């Protein structure tokens, strides 16, 4: 009885199928079922470039097996040659599918109507919220642990002092060494809520933001805008609850700056219509509402008049 071969790599599997063809032994029911399942799962996702790379890898792997076979004569070789060629062409195609799936194609996890928990190889745990999609490369974990996220998810990252964990979301990135945080993406509005540890959030056009526990990074849905908000605010002596710890704009139209100020400071700001598209670059970190609006007026070269909860910017 032949020793059962456990297929630890695709080249061994391809060569064993070739042996079946040449010896005219039937392919086992289990092998047929395996072929069928792989073909159904992967054929629809084939990528031309990856398929070519996969075929080359399979062919290189097959070279190991042929020198070990003793060709009895030129005649027997010619008899087998066409069968060998036909089978290898077929199996290289199948091998391309297998190798692409097993070694190249990223793993994609999708949460449809309910949360989905994903356990990564480094020990990190990702809870995908409904509609979220996580893409993990076959090389994960590497020296830098990188994943890609669409939608919302909560990350509990395994600690490592030397291997950063980076989440590339839609238009921004979050970098950590080990912590618990949540990423939220709703249209243009992006946010990172930090529960444990530390994270660095980077977004095009604005400085990197460093969060501490119970803090939140957001762009308020405005490009080139960054803010850090306290998730667990403490009442100050005047009984007002601070929320925005830092707020920066880089080349942002005035109308969008005002929209952020109004929605987060519960106030109204009026300004000349002709100034609404003027680009504003300012850091309002640490200022009160009045101080921030005074700074905005200074940038615009306007005067400020306050009536109850409304600020009027005028020439």
Image (spheres, helix red, strand yellow):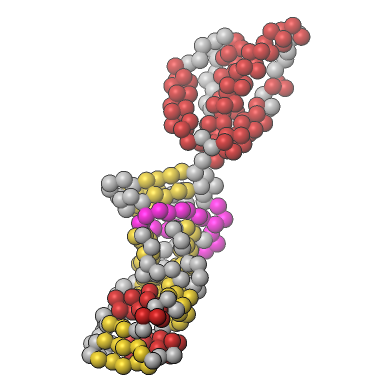
Residue at 61% in and 12% down: 22
Residue plotted at (36% across, 80% down): 273
Nearest the eye: 166 or 93: 93
Q: Using the rendered view, name the quadrant where residue 85 is placed.
A: top right
Q: Position of residue 231 (x, y in %)?
A: 31, 73
Q: Is residue 162 above or below residue 112?
A: below
Residue 306 at least partly seen: yes
The answer to which of 203 and 310 lies nearer the viewer is: 310
Q: Where in the figure is residue 42, as x and y percent of width and height?
A: 47, 32
Kindly identify the residue that appears in the image at 57 percent across and 14 percent down. Answer: 20
Given the current orientation, which residue lies at the most extreme front position?
Answer: 274
Please give the count of numbered marks on the rendered protein.
0
Q: Which residues are magenta?
A: 142-163
Q: Residue at x 25, y 91 (%)?
A: 307
Q: x and y percent of residue 38 in the render?
A: 46, 29
In reply to whether residue 251 is colored magenta, the answer given is no
**Quadrant assignment for the C terminus:** bottom left
Residue 155 colored magenta?
A: yes
**Residue 310 lies in quadrant:** bottom left
The residue nearer to you, when weighing 85 against 252, is 252
Question: Would residue 198 be seen by someone viewing this image from the given angle?
Answer: no
């Amino acid at each position: 009885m032949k020793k059962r071969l456990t297929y630890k790599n695709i080249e061994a599997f391809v060569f064993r199928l070739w042996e079946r063809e040449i010896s005219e032994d039937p392919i086992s029911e289990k092998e047929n079922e395996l072929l069928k399942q792989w073909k159904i799962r992967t054929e629809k996702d084939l990528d031309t470039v990856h398929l070519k790379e996969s075929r080359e890898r399979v062919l290189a792997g097959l070279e190991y097996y042929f020198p070990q076979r003793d060709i009895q004569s030129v005649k027997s070789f010619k008899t087998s040659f066409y069968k060998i060629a036909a089978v290898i062409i077929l199996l290289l195609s199948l091998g391309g599918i297998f190798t692409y799936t097993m070694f190249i194609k990223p793993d994609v996890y999708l949460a449809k109507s309910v949360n989905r928990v994903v356990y990564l190889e480094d020990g990190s745990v990702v809870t995908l919220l409904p509609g979220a999609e996580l893409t993990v490369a076959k090389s994960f974990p590497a020296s830098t642990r990188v994943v890609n996220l669409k939608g919302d998810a909560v990350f509990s990252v395994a600690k490592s002092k030397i291997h950063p964990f980076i989440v590339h979301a839609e238009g921004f990135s979050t970098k950590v060494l080990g912590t618990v945080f949540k990423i939220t993406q709703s249209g243009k509005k992006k946010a990172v809520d930090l529960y444990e540890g530390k994270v660095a959030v980077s977004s095009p056009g604005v400085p990197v933001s460093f969060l501490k526990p119970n803090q939140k990074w957001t762009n308020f849905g405005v490009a080139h805008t960054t803010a850090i908000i306290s998730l667990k605010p403490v009442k100050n002596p005047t009984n007002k609850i601070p929320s925005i710890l830092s707020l920066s704009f880089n080349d942002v139209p005035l109308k969008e700056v005002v929209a952020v100020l109004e929605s987060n400071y519960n106030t109204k700001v009026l300004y000349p219509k002709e100034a609404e598209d003027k680009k504003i670059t300012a850091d309002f970190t640490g200022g009160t509402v009045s101080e921030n609006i005074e700074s905005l007026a200074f940038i615009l070269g306007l005067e400020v008049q306050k009536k109850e909860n409304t600020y009027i910017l005028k020439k």
